[in-house]
Image: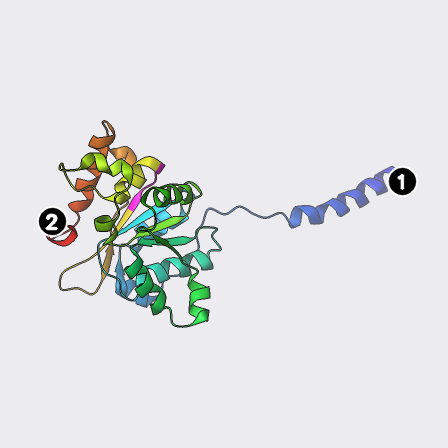
Amino acid sequence: MGKLNFLLAEDYLKPKIYFQSKHTDRFNVGYSSTDYDQFDGLEHLTQMLYSPKAVIINAFQIDYYQSLPKLICKTLKESRSYKKLYIVGPELSLSILKRSSKTVYEKHVNDIGYINVERDFQNVFQQCLMLLKEGHILYILPETSICWKPEPLQIFDDKFIPLCSTLLSQEAHVPILCSSSTENSNKITLHAPNIPNEYIGDFESRIYQQSESIYDLLESPTSDYLL
C-alpha cells in the first residue's frame, strides 16, 4: 500500500508541474509590412520595449497621425506588457493629439497617458521620474524642450540649450531612443539607443555631452528647429 500511495501522490502532483508558467526571453513583436514602410530602425524599438527598464522616446519630428505612439501601444498590447506610454508636451499640442483620437474604441485601444508640462514644472519633473522608475515609456514631443524647463536645467542659463530628455535620462538612468524624419522621405528613423552611462564627468558635463550627441543625429542645424 505504501508504494501505491506514493504513485497516487506522484500522479496528483504532476498537474501542478504541467501548469507552471514557463519563462520566455522572447519578445513577441509582429511588425507589419506597413510598419516597415513607415519606420527604419524597428530593431532598436524592439530592444527598448523588451527591456525591463523604462525608455524615453525623444521625437524630432511632428507626428500628426501619432504613428509611432500607436505602433508602441499596439506592440505593448500584443506582448501583454505592463508598460504604458505617456506623451509629454504643452497643453495645446496635447489637446490636438487627444482630438485626433476620434472614437472611444481608438482611445481605449491606444491607452495613452498625457502629461502637460505647462501645469507645474517641478511636479511634472517628479511625476516623469516616478513613471520612469516604474518602467514606463515617456514620449517627448519635439516642442517640449522649448516650453519645459525643470528647475535642475536652470543652471544652464546663458550656456547652452540642454534637452529635457537628457535630464530625465541622467536622473533616472534610462536610455533615450530618438526618432526623426529624413529629408525627402516619409519614413521615421529610430536611432540606436543613447545610453546615459556612456557620458562621464559632473552633472553639467554629462547633460552637455548627451544633448550634443542627440543634436548630432539631426541632419539640419538644431538651432533653427528647436530654439
Residue 117 visible at all:
yes
> Residue at the location (23% across, 29% down)?
200
For the residues labelled 2 and 1, the Cα–Cα distance comes to 85 Å
User: Is residue 175 in the magenta section?
Assistant: yes
* Most frequent secondary structure within the magenta stretch: loop
Mark 2, Cα crowd under 10 Å, few <14 / some 14-19 / many 20+, is few
Residue 77's disc number: none
Three-letter residue code for mark 1? Met
Q: Quadrant of residue 76?
A: bottom left
| Residue marked by disc 1 | 1
Considering the numbered disc 2 on the image, is that residue within a helix, a strand or a loop?
helix
In the rendered structure, are the residues bearing label 2 and label 1 in contact, judged by CB atoms less than 8 Å apart? no
- Looking at the rendering, the stretch of residues picked out in magenta corresponds to 172-176
Image height of 162 relative to 186, above or below: above
* Residue assigned mark 2: 223
- Which percent across, then down, holds residue 156? 19, 36
Question: How is the structure coloured here?
Answer: rainbow
Q: Residue 218 at what x, y percent from top left?
A: 15, 51
Is residue 121 rendered to the left or right of residue 209?
A: right
